[in-house]
Image: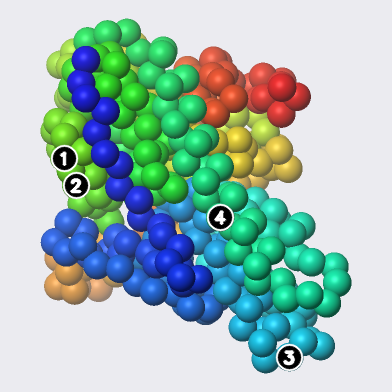
Amino acid sequence: MHAQPPVTHPIEWRDDVLVLLDQRRLPAAVSWVECRDANDVVAAIRDMVVRGAPAIGIAAAYGVALAARRHYERDRGTWRAALEDDIAALRAARPTAVNLMWALDRMREAIPAGGDDPFVVLAARACELHAADLAANQAMGAHGAALIAPGAGVLTHCNAGALATAGYGTALGVIRAGWAAGRIDAVYACETRPWLQGARLTAWELLADGIDVTLIVDGAAAHLMASGRVQWVVTGADRIAANGDTANKIGTYGLACLARAHGLKFMIAAPLSTIDRDTPSGADIPIEHRDAAELTHLAGQPVAAPGVHALNPVFDVTPAHLIDAIATEKGVVERPDRAALARLFEA
């Protein structure tokens, strides 16, 4: 058994201002970015000050509250139309993460029908979503960890931890719970090119919490699996289609293929808000592509041959048949399919 470690919280609501841990600067510096209106929040999401599907959704929720306050103060006759424009901008900031759309829909439902100041109501709703995500993380962590036999080694990819959520994490929530229960003895993290979320963020938060972690280059995953050091691969998700196909950080699909080839188990950890029942399969999930310079440059310096073309998809889709389990706050779905996922919403 290990002591339950403290947990990083990357999103704070301080005196009616959204304050975000700037994840672009980790681990070199711990600094915070203040967001006072929706434009600030859109920029923070787009520029990856805040990242991770649940965290993006929470930040956007607060962005709606901030937008409502600004527009209501400026013009009590037109604030609703102006607010809808800001909601559309928030929705477009990162297209793959369905938690963003889910959170904006929940915020829209809370917009007051009358003429009263909307800020108090919307800020309260954003705080509710924030608290609910933390509780969901802790529940899914316990559910997912229960699947892992004591003494296991676990490989994770990207950062699906406290930094990607309200706190505690999805995939890292499973790892935190498994570590505290003595089920997990070794944790490995892929570096996760090109933004190095594994090296910069996952390693940083696990070490800060007293959880031992070993970093590997992305290309070493097959070697690690063949060595017998890991029994599970556990990742988060940015969108889960109705049939269980799952979009996550680029490279996740390859890890699922490798896990199956080596006889290892593959788990997705995600809240119900990540399951998009309106998206039939992975083929219908939009895949974000980012600037080629993220591949050809590092810290602003060129690292590739001048003139080379670069393809930079941010996510890939893991077919449901390669996923052994999806851990949610409502429990675990093993061998996920459309019917099994639908039952989660009936409970």
- The residue shown at (30%, 42%) is 7
In the displayed image of the protein, which residue is found farthest to the bottom?
74
Q: Quadrant of residue 92?
A: bottom right
Pointer 4 with pointer 3, Cβ within 8 A:
no
Please name whichever residue, 319 or 268, is drawn nearer the observer in this view of the structure: 268
Instruction: Find disc 4 in the rendering and name its residue.
Output: 127
Nearer to us of marks 3 and 1 is 3
**336 vs 56, nearest the viewer:** 56
Q: Which residue is mark 2?
A: 204
**Horizontal and vertical percent for residue 77?**
81, 88
- At a point 26% along the width and 28% down the height, the residue shown is 4
Do tag 4 and tag 1 residues touch (Cβ < 8 Å)?
no
Q: Of the numbered discs in the image, which one, if any, rests on residue 116?
A: none
The residue under label 3 is: 75
Q: Are marks 2 and 3 in contact (CB under 8 Å)?
A: no
Q: Amino acid at mark 3?
A: Asp
Tags 1 and 2 touching, CB below 8 Å? yes
Q: Earlier in the sequence, mark 3 or mark 1?
A: 3
Q: Could one spot residue 218 in this view of the protein?
A: no
In the image, residue 271 lies at what x, y percent?
Answer: 54, 36
Q: Tell me how far mark 1 sits from mark 2, CA to CA.
A: 5 Å
- Disc on the earlier residue, 2 or 3: 3
Q: Residues within 10 Å of mark 2 (few under 14, many from 20)?
A: some
Apparent side of residue 305 relative to residue 10 in the rendered image (left or right):
left
Residue flagged by tag 1: what amino acid is it?
Leu
Q: CA distance from mark 2 to mark 3?
A: 45 Å
